Image (cartoon, helix red, strand yellow):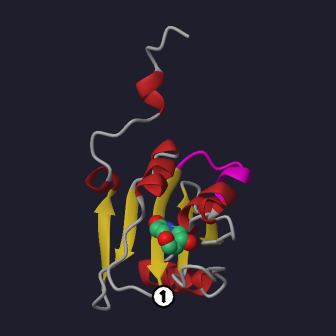
Amino acid sequence: MSDINDLYAQARHAADNSYAPYSNFHVGAVVVAEDGRVFTGCNVENAAYGSAICAEGNAISSAAAAGVRKIDTVVVACLDAGECYPCGNCRQLMREFKVNTVVVQDGEGSLRTHKFGEILPHSFGPDSLENNAN
Ligand code: THU
């Protein structure tokens, strides 16, 4: 398993490819699957603003498309902000694939590591549908 600083460097590198002409807010993300495979993503904006894709969602989708169903760690890097946390929608995307750990920058040159439940407590997920009569 890669060192967390190396994963963060990969997330920053992914952010270099961010397509963010509208917000100028460049984000990169790294996903480490349960089996150790690593996927990267950046945010991709659109003239129809609501069609923007977040970096985390992009990386998670790449992992899912490669067959990943369980993610260990997500690392987020923002080039244009200090402290930088995933948006609510990305937290929900993480929930689906059982993310254990989320690593973010603290804006002072260090990384913060969170258990997933700290950033999305009392969440709705696949198990929430288990008793659905349908
Ligand atoms: N963005 C991300 O890529 N991830 C987040 O968790 C928060 C926001 C992107 C979306 C948009 O392209 C830009 O940052 C400004 O919101």
Residue at 43 percent across and 84 percent down: it is: 5
Rendered view: 106 above or below 100: below
Dot 1, crowdedness within 10 Å: few (<14), some or many (≥20)? some
Does residue 118 appear in this view? yes
Residue 124: % across, % down: 39, 36
Residue 134: % across, % down: 56, 10
Q: Residue furthest front?
A: 48
* SS majority, magenta: loop
Q: Is residue 110 left or right of residue 134?
A: left
**Viewer-proximal residue, 92 or 40?**
92
Residue 69: % across, % down: 60, 45
**Local secondary structure at mark 1:** loop
- The three-letter code of the residue at mark 1 reads Leu
Q: Is residue 100 left or right of residue 117?
A: right
**Viewer-proximal residue, 2 or 95?**
95
Label 1 belongs to which residue? 79
Residue 10 lies in the magenta-colored region: no
User: What stretch of residues is rendered in magenta?
Assistant: 63-70
